[in-house]
Image: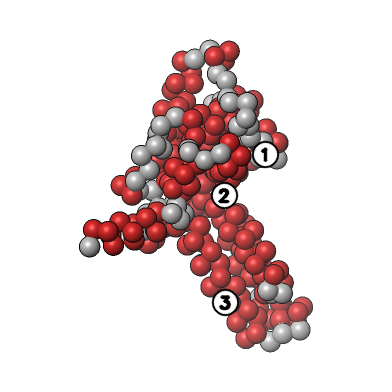
Amino acid sequence: MSGVVKTKVAAEFATTRWSEIQAARTATPEHRQAVLENLARRYWKPVYCYLRARGQQDADARDITQDFFVEVILGRDLFGQAEPHRGRFRPYLLHCLKNFVRDWYRRERAQRRSPKDLMLSIHQWADSESSRCLPLALDERPEEVFHRKWAASLLEQVLDNLRAACQRSELHVHFELFRQRVVRPALEQVEPGPVEELARRYGLTAKQVSNRVETVRRRFRRLLLEEVRLTVMDDTAAGEELRSLMGHLSRRAG
């Protein structure tokens, strides 16, 4: 029985960020670079914006973000014991970030050196993002900025995946209707346009518009849960994580 349980846990564990990091620690330099690049590309925004919210200037926030991913994710042993009890990836990453920032302040800049074979494109990515992290709400703490940006980045990734999936399936109109009826109203806090107007624009009936929107909505929910599932250890935790992230977004919108 114990062998069956271990096999099941290993199968689930193999689909998470924890296992991705653990495997990269003993992989080739090229594979380690690819893993680091993937993690940084997905999660640099909440890290960078957290630092900006703490009062860091843009240049320092970029440097600290770069050092954090290179030194902590693959350089230190913080993720060396990647086990199911670690739980959700998001709060643990924030915990590691806080510890890293404290250490970073204690060191001279001349003593900080990222491995030359593990460099990231933080500065390039941040060129289009730095102005979007500020200003903050008067009562918004840096931790809340981190969680909100994490949620926003996750939605951005899911929508990109959804758009690509719809294009491959030749569901361009389906996605556009979903964007007009669901995405735009949610992101811009506006009322969705009348179904009848969209029906006339695309030569459809109102029912056809609604059916197409629902088709894409189902795909969106599935992709969203799959993305969240990468950062937790089971489906129960995935549901809790998703509710938490949506809560952070809704509090900001409110």
Q: Point out which mark residue 133 bears.
A: none
Q: Name which quarter of the figure residue 70 lies in.
A: top right
Cα–Cα gap, marks 2 and 3: 23 Å
* Residue 61: percent from left, percent from top: 58, 28
* Circle nearer the N terminus (1, 2): 1
* Camera-nearest residue between 183 and 137: 183
Cα–Cα gap, marks 1 and 3: 34 Å
What amino acid does circle 3 point to? Answer: Glu
Q: Residues within 10 Å of mark 1 (few under 14, many from 20)?
A: some
* Residue 127: percent from left, percent from top: 70, 36
Badge 2 is on which residue?
A: 153
Taking the spot 62% from the left edge, 86% from the top edge, the residue there is 207
Taking the spot 47% from the left edge, 62% from the top edge, the residue there is 225
Q: Is residue 51 visible?
A: no
* Camera-nearest residue between 169 and 157: 169
* Residue 250: percent from left, percent from top: 48, 54
- Give the answer, above or below, for where 246 lies relative to 40: below
Badge 3 is on which residue?
A: 214
Badge 1 is on which residue?
A: 125
Horizontally, residue 20 falls left or right of residue 117, namely left
Tag 2 near tag 3, CB within 8 Å = no
Q: Name which quarter of the figure residue 158 lies in.
A: bottom right
Horizontally, residue 148 falls left or right of residue 176, namely left
